[in-house]
Image: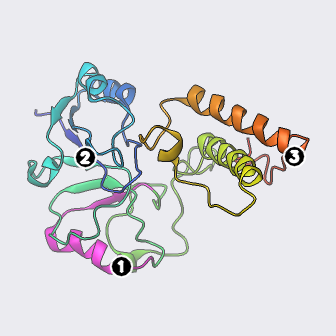
């Protein structure tokens, strides 16, 4: 019996460097008998994947061209993180695993969901799922009784977590120092300004080192370090 093929697509959204699969999860899937194809990372600094292509290849994945999911065999499951390019409207014939952001009356949800309806594919949405399985395409089927995917303890699985709080705290500290250094109200630039044009930090250590330097500069101006207030300290981000 042929193995199930998972096709990791390159992300479309600018400044999206994350990946729905990591090299380690790819290895686990390959070891479990799946065939994993990974589209090569976009070369643009705005969309370059945080994980090098070579790490996926070493994990047992086959590297394929960016955008090749469109012409992949129909039985391939297309895996992505964020929603597809909203400027495209061709029918979707594949089954997709992704965050489509369509189930809460977001603008353009009819057009987005209609692509699967017209193509015969299925959306397995990572955000809004039924406990007993994926919520297949169909906004009219959505009821108040539908719930987010939960683990055995009733805790939502696909949700903001530790690193969301980590990044938010870092951004808050950087903004605090920036405002002290720029009393004229100059807006805080995008992350590419602080990462040599990459648009992302290579690792936590690089970001922490930079934020520590920001705080020290801000403290010299303010005469003190910032006070930190955590709202929802026992929640996912607060912890």
Question: Which corner quadrant holds the N terminus?
Answer: top left
In the picture, the disc for residue 222 is: 3
Asked if marks 3 and 2 touch (Cβ < 8 Å), the reply is: no
Let me know if residue 119 is in the magenta part.
Answer: yes
First to last magenta residue range? 106-126
Residue beneath disc 1:
108
Nearest to the eye among marks 3 and 1: give it: 3
Task: Check disc 2 and report its element: helix, strand or loop.
Answer: loop
- Residue tagged by mark 2? 9
Q: Quadrant of the C terminus?
A: top right
Foreground mark, 3 or 2, reads: 3
Vertical position of residue 215 compared to residue 232: above or below: above
Q: Tell me which corner region of the image, top left, top right, bottom left or bottom right, holds residue 84.
A: bottom left
The secondary structure type at the circle numbered 3 is helix
In whole angstroms, how far apart are the C-alphas of marks 3 and 2? 46 Å
Q: Residues within 10 Å of mark 2 (few under 14, many from 20)?
A: many
- Chain-order first, disc 3 or disc 2: 2
Identity of the residue drawn at 78% across and 34% down: 216
The CA span between labels 3 and 1 is 46 Å
Residue 238: where, in percent of width, then height? 74, 46
Colouring style? rainbow
Taking depth in this image into account, of 168 and 157 the one nearest to the observer is 168
């Amino acid at each position: 019996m042929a193995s199930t093929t998972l096709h990791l697509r390159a992300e479309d959204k600018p400044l999206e460097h994350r990946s729905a699969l990591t090299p380690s999860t790819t290895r686990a899937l390959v070891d479990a008998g799946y065939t994993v194809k990974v589209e090569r990372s976009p070369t643009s600094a705005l969309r370059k994947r945080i994980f090098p292509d070579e790490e996926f290849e070493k994990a047992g994945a086959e590297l394929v061209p960016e955008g090749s999911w469109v012409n992949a065999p129909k039985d391939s499951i297309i895996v992505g993180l964020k929603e597809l390019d909203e400027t495209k409207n061709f029918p979707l014939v594949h089954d997709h695993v992704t965050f489509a952001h369509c189930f809460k009356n977001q603008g353009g949800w009819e057009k987005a969901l209609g692509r699967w309806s017209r193509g015969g594919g299925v959306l397995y949405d990572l955000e809004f799922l039924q406990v007993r399985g994926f919520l297949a395409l169909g906004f009219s089927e959505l009821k108040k009784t539908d719930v987010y995917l939960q683990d055995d303890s009733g805790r939502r699985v696909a949700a903001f977590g530790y690193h969301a709080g980590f990044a938010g705290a870092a951004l808050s500290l950087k903004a605090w120092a920036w405002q002290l250094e720029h009393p004229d109200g100059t807006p805080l630039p995008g992350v590419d300004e602080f990462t040599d044009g990459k648009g992302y930090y290579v690792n936590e250590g690089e970001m922490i080192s930079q934020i520590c330097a920001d705080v020290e500069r801000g403290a010299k101006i303010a005469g003190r370090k910032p006070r930190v207030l955590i709202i929802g300290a026992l929640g996912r981000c607060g912890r």
